[in-house]
Amino acid sequence: MKTSPFQPDQTSLAYSVGITLDRFIKLKQSDFPFASGELSQLLRDIVLAAKIVNRETNRAGLANIGGAFGQTNVQGEEQQKLDVIANIRFMRALSKGGEVCAIVSEEEDAVIDLQNNSGKYVVAIDPLDGSSNIDVNISIGTIFSIYRRKSPIGSPIQLKDIMQPGREQVAAGYVLYGSSTMLVYTTGCGVNGFTYENSLGEFFLSHPDIQAPKTGNIYSINEGLQLEWEKGIAAYIQSCKERKMQSRYIGSLVADFHRNLLKGGIYLYPATQKNPSGKLRLLYEANALAFIIEQAGGKASDGKQRILDVQPESLHQRTPLLIGSAQMVEEVEQSVVLHSSLVTV
Ligand SMILES: O=P(O)(O)OC[C@H]1O[C@](O)(COP(=O)(O)O)[C@@H](O)[C@@H]1O
Ligand SMILES: [Mg+2]
Ligand SMILES: [Mg+2]
């Protein structure tokens, strides 16, 4: 669409490192002919809340916002103060924007119905991921999924608006509060990463068009649960060790996922005796990362099927998660199938 030799090509402009997130969102909006700008505004609302949570995270140790909040959430997990602060910040940003009709949050027992029948979008969010690492200054994150409602606009929300399989996502992303703060997201046209420039208060494109390496040398799993793994998982991890692969486990899903997305690798949180359906939550952890990894050429499975094809049945349902480089996920799926067939003989 070059009109003059001096006018930069929109596409290459969109992907030029250093472009601001806001400009990128504007340029990418043209990918969607019927775009009305509401999804773009919703992304901006999420980013605004993420900037505030980033500030709180950076000063957690100083401002007495580390430590437990003194309540447990619907999953029986002790809430950290920053879990609650992040949840409040995202709830406010999402309800103020006007584009959202309902929210599913890890920190809320039930669906938050914003009574905004003109809102087009449903958001599922893990406001603070990696809570066990908050007080020890290890990378943590935020994970979000965005769906377009199924029921007619103007009508009250219905269960079908919430219980959508991951393949229905229109956008998904995460924010990583680490040595630098990054936003990585997709709207179904590839995956892009932005780095936060604190002094300017802006996210800048730093990782255009992320492609997950087809295979890798890193496996991430909580080895402390080894005795609870099914045979297929145990055999696969044993084969990783025999191939002298590197074991890397931070204990913050977003951080482990991000490393493996860029370097190649696999993250596994399989079913265990304590969590027979796995630990991680389908609606606000697994679905978002599965959308991103598939958009980057990787894979995400529960061991038997594609995460994005799992039909949700409850808000906080858990799922086994095997996610990362395509060849590595295929390998562990084969190992799971092989060993489950061996057990039955
Ligand atoms: O301590 P474990 O059992 O290895 O679990 C760690 C996993 O649990 C989580 O902390 C769960 O997420 P939340 O912190 O959002 O509850 C993941 O980030 C992480 O990968
Ligand atoms: Mg989490
Ligand atoms: Mg969380």
Image (tube, helix red, strand yellow):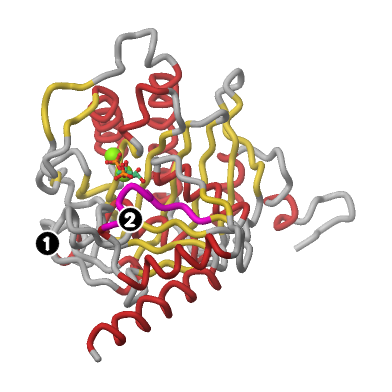
Mark 1, ligand 3, within 8 Å: the answer is no
Q: Which residues are magenta?
A: 219-227
Task: Pick the residue in front: 58 or 332.
Answer: 332
Residue 42: x and y in percent read 38, 44
Determine which quarter of the picture holds residue 209: bottom right
Q: Residue at x 35, y 22 (%)?
A: 135
Is residue 189 visible in the rendered image? The answer is: no
Q: Secondary structure at mark 2?
A: helix
Above or below, 294 against 41 in this view is below
Three-letter amino acid code at the position of disc 1: Gln
Residue 69: x and y in percent read 18, 22
Q: Residue at x 55, y 65 (%)?
A: 325
Residue 243: x and y in percent read 60, 64
Q: Quadrant of the C terminus?
A: bottom left
Q: Would residue 174 appear left or right of 281 to someone viewing this image? A: right
**Disc sitting over residue 158 in the figure:** 1
Q: Residue at x 47, y 42 (%)?
A: 255
Q: Residues within 10 Å of mark 2 (few under 14, many from 20)?
A: few
Q: Secondary structure at mark 1?
A: loop
**Disc sitting over residue 226 in the figure:** 2
Above or below, 78 against 23 in this view is above
Gap between marks 2 and 1 measured at Cα: 41 Å
